[in-house]
Image (spheres, helix red, strand yellow):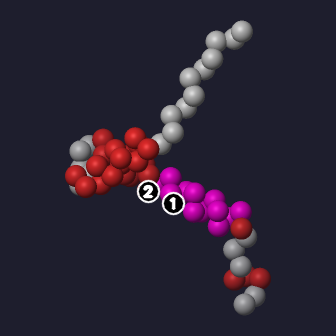
Amino acid sequence: MTDADVIPREQALASARRALDRARAERDHARAAGRLPAELELACRRLERQRPRPAAHRAAA
């Protein structure tokens, strides 16, 4: 293997993030349009319920 065959780590991670962001956007668009299969919609809802909620902001003392 030569140096030309190696993808720098940062480039690989950026590429993976773009692909994941694109897939999430497509899923969200399909879900908003009601085109997500029922079993996937239920899985999304279950995951959303399990996701930790952001802490409420506390009033300054």
Q: Is residue 47 above or below residue 6?
A: above
Q: Element type at marker 2?
A: helix
Where's residue 36, x and y in %? 26, 51
Where's residue 43, x and y in %? 33, 52
Q: Element type at marker 1?
A: helix
Asked if labels 2 and 1 touch by Cβ distance under 8 angstroms, the answer is yes
State which region is magenta. Answer: 10-22
- Residue tagged 2: 23
Q: In front here: 21 or 40?
A: 40
* Left or right, 52 with reference to 2: left
Residue type at numbered disc 2:
Ala
Residue type at numbered disc 1:
Ala
Residue 12 visible: yes
Quadrant of the frame with the C terminus: top right
Q: Is residue 45 magenta?
A: no
Q: Is residue 11 above or below residue 34?
A: below
- Residue tagged 1: 19
